[in-house]
Amino acid sequence: MSSAKETPNKQQLPPSLDLKNWLPFVKKWSIITETLWLIPKRDNSGSMKELHHGEFIPQIPRQAILRFTKPYELVIDPFVGYGTTLVECQRLGRNGIGVELERHIAEVANRRIKEEQNPYNVKVEVIEGDSSDFDFNEILHERNFAEASLIIAHPPYHDIIKYGQDPRNLANARTLEDFLQAYGKVLDNVLRVLARSGYYVLVIGDKYTKGEWIPLGFHTMNETLKRGLKLKAICVKNFEETMAKRRQINLWKYRTLKLGTYFFKHEYVMFFRKE
């Protein structure tokens, strides 16, 4: 695919999976090939040292980028949030475009990518706006890209965390049906620029509402499958540290015993391919 940057000298090429010599690559980059992802600690190196409520860990986009893209290809994140995907694009030599609705969050993402080193001279960019009505074709054309090889989506888990006041924010959807409809609009829009055989990665968790488990992951999976994508894997990743549960683990255990529920220690990483 076309790229907005020229390739630097061969001694500085970004990492790339070569199936003829796959084992050293898998070992060096800790590539996960199983569906159970036990990641003991969030990578807090470089500009990722600060933890923000609700962001996902860098290891998730890292796994997807290393498995399903080649150097200098384009990665899009329509819910870029605090910029985790774009930081990994810089580290791994992939171009990246992220869209964020809330200005105060986009500012954090911009600061992070400015603080992070860019050893492969790639282009990463945060665009402030709504992914459901962006003209992604025009955005890519203006930046000299033909298509995206990978889309990584980490939408709000409906109303669990309020990220801002904008009514277009999926975290402010009034009902589950409104949330799924809004998610579907973003999906329809961004899939237009995903390359054939490109991958769409959905990072999502479930939630409780009034003591009832809401399988948000499977609801969004079904919305995604309606778009004709092929489901390639559902991976389950563990939660070992969250801001909400820090130093309060016994309180959460007590609540689950009292309410007859369980507290979350997992989220889903779903892989779809465009046929």
Image (cartoon, rainbow, N blue to C red):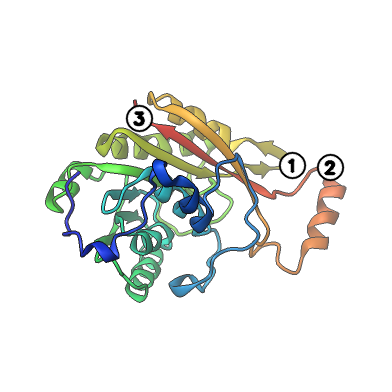
Nearest to N terminus: mark 2 or mark 3: 2
In the image, 98 versus 7, the foreground residue is 7
Q: Position of residue 241 (x, y in %)?
A: 66, 62
User: For the point 13% across and 47% down, which residue is it?
Assistant: 141
Q: Hey, what amino acid is under mark 3?
A: Lys
> Is 63 placed above or below 242 here?
above
Nearest to N terminus: mark 1 or mark 2: 1
**Residue to which mark 3 is pinned:** 274
Q: Hey, what amino acid is under mark 1?
A: Gly
In the image, 146 versus 27, the foreground residue is 27
User: How many discs mark residues in the rendered view?
Assistant: 3
> Is 204 placed above or below 243 here?
above
Q: Position of residue 15 (x, y in %)?
A: 37, 56
In the image, 128 versus 224, the foreground residue is 224
**Residue to which mark 2 is pinned:** 260
**Residue to which mark 1 is pinned:** 211
User: For the point 27% across and 49% down, which residue is it?
Assistant: 73
Viewport quadrant of the N terminus? top left
Mark in front: 3 vs 1: 3
Q: Hey, what amino acid is under mark 2?
A: Gly
- 3D distance between C-alphas at marks 1 and 2: 8 Å
Q: Is residue 135 visible?
A: no
Callouts 3 and 1 close, C-beta under 8 Å: no
User: For the point 26% across and 35% down, which residue is it?
Assistant: 192
Q: Residue 185's quadrant in the figure?
A: top left
Nearest to N terminus: mark 3 or mark 1: 1
> Is 105 placed above or below 35 here?
below
User: For the point 38% across and 66% down, which residue is it?
Assistant: 109
In the image, 248 versus 193, the foreground residue is 193
